[in-house]
């Protein structure tokens, strides 16, 4: 990739700011000062800006413990979004949330720069399981487990059969394969147990890292990334 393109993708400078950085000798590639934006950066090269090594990976995969009160969106004119909880390099690399959690829903949110991966993981056709812990009003009963297993009619559509495990009278663990708008809340609402709090614990092969405090994030490791591509049915080297 061209050096100027790399620097702009990483959010280090605008196109014109880049020219200035290069002209003033602030950028080195493998120890050599490079002044030309057209310079082709070799794979795995060490690029520094003012001596600071840059993380040149363009593909990123994150897990966030989404806190309540922020929107799952790339940007919003008025409200805080999950992107506001990340260093700006992720927005610059066009990292995007995989699917959506409601503003008041907490827990596991994946973000990636790979649009196809994101698309496949949320496609209803792929049936990737998502697990939610719901605290509800009232007491869950065996007949609710059966209703979830049968597929709950929600007016505009009938939810696919889902698994409900009762952890406590007012706490259920729901495993669903779709992700329609407010789906899990609507499913509990339909059996007369409105959701008071919802937290996602799993997305496909990945579990929420309990070491992450609400609002924290971390990059996925190679094993986790490979598991996601496998769940999405995409070959990934
Ligand atoms: N289902 C919901 O109702 N809300 C969420 O945030 C996610 C799934």
Image (cartoon, rainbow, N blue to C red):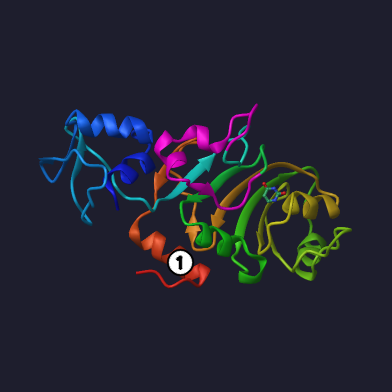
Q: Which residue is mark 1?
A: 229
Drawn side of residue 206 relative to residue 20, left or right: right
Task: Name the residue furthest left.
Answer: 31
Question: Which residue is at 79% across, 42% downward?
Answer: 137
Report helix, strand or loop for mark 1.
helix
Reply yes or no: does residue 95 show up in magenta.
yes
Q: Residues within 10 Å of mark 1 (few under 14, many from 20)?
A: some
Q: Is residue 102 above or below residue 207?
A: above
Q: Is residue 191 above or below residue 16?
A: below
How many badges with numbers are in the image? Answer: 1
Question: Which residue is at 47% across, 71% downward?
Answer: 234
Nearest to the observer: residue 26 or residue 140: 26
Quarter holding the C terminus is: bottom left
Question: Which residue is at 66% across, 64% downward?
Answer: 177
Q: Quadrant of residue 27?
A: top left
Drawn side of residue 148 relative to residue 87, left or right: right
Part of the protein shown in magenta = 75-101
Coordinates of residue 161 in the picture (x, y in percent): 74, 69
Q: Is residue 148 above or below residue 139?
A: below
Drawn side of residue 188 relative to residue 83, left or right: right
């Amino acid at each position: 990739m061209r050096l100027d393109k790399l620097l702009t993708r990483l959010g280090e400078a605008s196109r014109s700011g880049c020219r200035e950085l290069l002209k003033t000798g602030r950028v080195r590639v493998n120890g050599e000062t490079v002044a030309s934006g057209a310079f082709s950066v070799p794979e795995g090269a060490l690029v520094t800006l003012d001596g600071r090594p840059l993380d040149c990976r363009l593909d990123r995969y994150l897990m966030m413990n989404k806190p309540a009160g922020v929107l799952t969106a790339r940007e919003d004119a008025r409200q805080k979004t999950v992107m506001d909880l990340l260093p700006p390099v992720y927005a610059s690399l066009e990292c995007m949330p995989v699917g959506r959690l409601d503003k008041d829903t907490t827990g596991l949110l994946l973000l990636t720069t790979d649009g196809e991966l994101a698309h496949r993981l949320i496609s209803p056709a792929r049936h990737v399981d998502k697990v939610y812990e719901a605290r509800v009003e009232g007491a869950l009963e065996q007949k609710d487990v059966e209703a979830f297993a049968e597929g709950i009619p929600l007016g505009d559509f009938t939810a696919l059969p889902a698994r409900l495990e009762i952890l406590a009278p007012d706490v259920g663990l729901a495993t669903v394969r779709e992700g329609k708008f407010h789906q899990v809340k609507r499913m509990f609402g339909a059996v007369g147990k409105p959701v008071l709090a919802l937290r996602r614990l799993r997305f496909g092969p990945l579990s929420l890292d309990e070491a992450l405090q609400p609002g924290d994030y971390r990059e996925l490791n190679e094993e986790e990334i490979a598991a996601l591509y496998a769940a999405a049915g995409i070959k990934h080297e």
